[in-house]
Every structure is written in structure tokens, then in C-alpha cells.
Image (cartoon, rainbow, N blue to C red):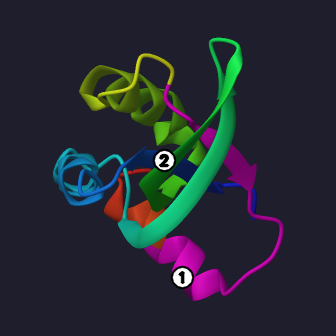
């Protein structure tokens, strides 16, 4: 099942839709969920920050992962965007096949 990756990306509040659409249009993901209204507490430049953000839950293939990371870094407004790729160890095999097919990975 590790043919599929779930990638988490946070974005400024209201920016998630633009990023999601660009990622899907470029066929770098079969699906992107945009979860609005998350609050992120984090260290940045020596102090704790709090921001309202969108969370992108991106489904892609192993083959597209490097291209996805590169694209997100190019289109994302943050200088150091969160991009965390998680292996999918189990799931609906039909969904996994659909993800891989939609991004041209098989």
C-alpha cells in the first residue's frame, strides 16, 4: 500500500483552496481535502506564534511525491511550508488504485 502517500500541508487561512486547486490541476494529487479553521501554535524566529490556518490533506502516489513537494514549495506563501508525507500501510485497495491512476502513476 505504500504506493500511496498522504501529505499534510498547512496554509494561511483562506489560501487552502488556491493551493489545492493548483495541486490537483497539475495532477500531483488525486484528491485534496481542505480543512478550515485550524489553529496552529508553533515556534518561529525565537517566539511562539498562533495562526488560523487551513490544513490540506493530499492523496498522491510515491512516484509523484517529489514533484508535489517541489510544487508546493514554489506556490506556497510561507518560506518554510509544512510538508509531511505519511505512508499508507492499509486501506481500500480500490481507492489506492484510483489515486495512483489519477496521478498517472500506474
Q: Image check: 88 left or right of 37?
A: right
Residue identifier under label 2: 51
What percent of the width, then of the height, locates residue 57? 51, 63
Give the residues drawn in magenta, as a range.
81-98
Judged from the image, the secondary structure of the residue bearing numbered disc 1 is helix
What percent of the width, then of the height, locates residue 73? 39, 23
Q: Image check: 90 left or right of 49?
A: right
58 or 94: nearer the viewer? 58
Whether residue 87 is in magenta: the answer is yes
What percent of the width, then of the height, locates residue 58? 47, 59
Residue 62 in view (yes/no):
yes
Give the answer, above or below, for where 8 lies relative to 43.
below
Q: Quadrant of residue 95?
A: bottom right
Residue at the image position 42 percent from the left and 36 percent from the top: 68
42 or 31: nearer the viewer? 42
90 or 41: nearer the viewer? 41
Residue at the image position 36 percent from the left and 55 percent from the top: 103
Residue at the image position 26 percent from the left and 50 percent from the top: 27
Amino acid at each position: 500500500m505504500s504506493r500511496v502517500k498522504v501529505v499534510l500541508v498547512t496554509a494561511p487561512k483562506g489560501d487552502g483552496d488556491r493551493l489545492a486547486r493548483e495541486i490537483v490541476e497539475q495532477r500531483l494529487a488525486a484528491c485534496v481535502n481542505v480543512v478550515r479553521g485550524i489553529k496552529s501554535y508553533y515556534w518561529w524566529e525565537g517566539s511562539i506564534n498562533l495562526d488560523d490556518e487551513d490544513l490540506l490533506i493530499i492523496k498522491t502516489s510515491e512516484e509523484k511525491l517529489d514533484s508535489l513537494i517541489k510544487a508546493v514549495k514554489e506556490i506556497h506563501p510561507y518560506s518554510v511550508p509544512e510538508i509531511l508525507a505519511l505512508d499508507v500501510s492499509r486501506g481500500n485497495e480500490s481507492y489506492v488504485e484510483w489515486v495512483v491512476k489519477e496521478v498517472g502513476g500506474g
